[in-house]
Amino acid sequence: MVLDEAVGLSLEAVAGGGGQLHTYFLHAHVALWGIAVVSVGVALALVQTGHQLLASLEDSGELLGRKGGKIE
């Protein structure tokens, strides 16, 4: 995963005395926030689609098993 790679590279930078530790942690932080934002966006889209589907079924009467105003 991205975080595992970032932590591994960060540990290598510390062990090797490199100055890129901050950069690796920053990349991991940005990647995790990006994943979180996309996940929330997908969840909201699914909820909205579900609400639209339920509203459509209620309007057509199929949700209650009615067609043409008569209960079957």
Image: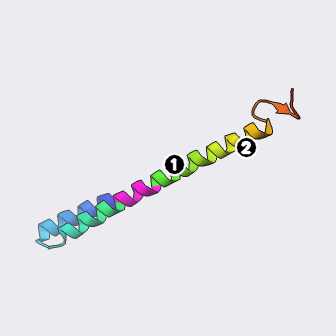
Question: Horizontal and vertical percent for residue 69?
Answer: 86, 31
Place residue 34 in its image quadrant: bottom left
- When the figure is inspected, residue 5 is found, relative to residue 60, above or below; the finding is below
Q: Main secondary structure of the magenta part?
A: helix
> In terms of depth relative to the viewer, which is nearer, 49 or 31?
49
Q: Nearer the viewer, residue 8 or 48?
A: 48
Q: Say what secondary structure mark 2 lies in.
A: helix
* Residue 44 drawn at (x, y percent): 52, 49
**Amino acid type, label 1:** Ala
Q: Residue at x 52, y 53 (%)?
A: 42
Would residue 34 be found to the left or right of residue 50 on screen? left
Q: Which dot, 2 or 1, sits closer to the camera?
A: 2
Q: Residue 7 occupies which quadrant of the picture?
A: bottom left
CA neighbours of label 2 inside 10 A, class few (<14), some (14 to 19), many (20+) = few
Residue 5 counted in the magenta span: no
Kindly identify the amino acid type of the residue bearing the numbered disc 2: Ser
Q: Is residue 53 visible?
A: yes
Residue 24 spot, x, y in % from top left? 25, 67
List the residue tagged with mark 1.
43
- Disc number for residue 56: 2
Q: Is residue 40 above or below residue 61?
A: below
Residue 36 image-quadrant placement:
bottom left
Magenta stretch: give its range: 32-38
Colour mapping: rainbow
Element on which disc 1 rests: helix
Residue that extends furthest to the top in the rendered view of this protein:
71
Q: Residue at x 14, y 73 (%)?
A: 18
